[in-house]
Amino acid sequence: MAQYPQQLDDVFHALADPTRREVLGRLGAGPASVSELAEPFEMALPSFMKHIRYLESAGWISTRKSGRVRTCVLERKSFDVVEAWLREQRDIWERRTDRLERFVTTTHDKATEKEARE
């Protein structure tokens, strides 16, 4: 994901905070107003809004305002970015462990052949 370094940084930084993770978990059940999301947290609404703005700027959520109510909705695109990065990392590590397995097997087979000749 070298082509999206800042986006990836923002996505993971948003996940680094437990409040933001809880908000995302709640939004997994469906859209919610900011006041509904803020209810379980013991913090002032302006402080909570910083979390909402960060999640929105990182692409995890979108918000819309209807009258005096701001509703938050989970966005899939950030999940796609994380999923692609994790898939890339998994591929890299699987190739490395495959090479290690080939090395160990080859080394073991050569040692076994040498012992058999002796």
Image: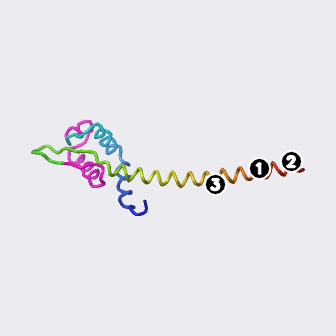
Q: Position of residue 60 (x, y in %)?
A: 30, 49
Secondary structure of the residue carrying numbered label 3: helix
Q: Would residue 76 be found to the left or right of residue 31 on screen?
A: right
Circle nearer the N terminus (2, 3): 3
Name the residue: 23% across, 40% down. Answer: 31
Q: Where is residue 85 in the image (x, y as percent from the top left)?
A: 44, 54
How crowded is the residue under tag 3: few (<14 C-alpha within 10 Å), some, or many (20+)? few
Circle nearer the N terminus (2, 1): 1
Q: Where is residue 30 in the image (x, y as percent from the top left)?
A: 26, 38
Which region of the structure is painted magenta?
35-63
Secondary structure of the residue carrying numbered label 1: helix
Residue 31 colored magenta? no
Name the residue: 31% across, 39% down. Answer: 28
Question: Pointer 2: what residue?
Answer: 116
Amino acid, disc 1: Asp
Point out the residue furthest to the bottom here: 3
Question: Pointer 3: what residue?
Answer: 99
Q: Where is residue 38 in the image (x, y as percent from the top left)?
A: 23, 40
Q: Distance between the residues labelled 2 and 1?
A: 11 Å
Point out the residue furthest to the left here: 67
Is there CB contact under 8 Å for labels 2 and 1?
no
Q: How far apart are marks 2 and 3 (CA)?
A: 26 Å
Amino acid, disc 2: Ala
Question: Pointer 1: what residue?
Answer: 109
Amino acid, disc 3: Arg
Name the residue: 24% across, 47% down. Answer: 47
Q: Distance between the residues labelled 1 and 3?
A: 15 Å
Point out the residue furthest to the right here: 118
Is there CB contact under 8 Å for labels 2 and 3?
no
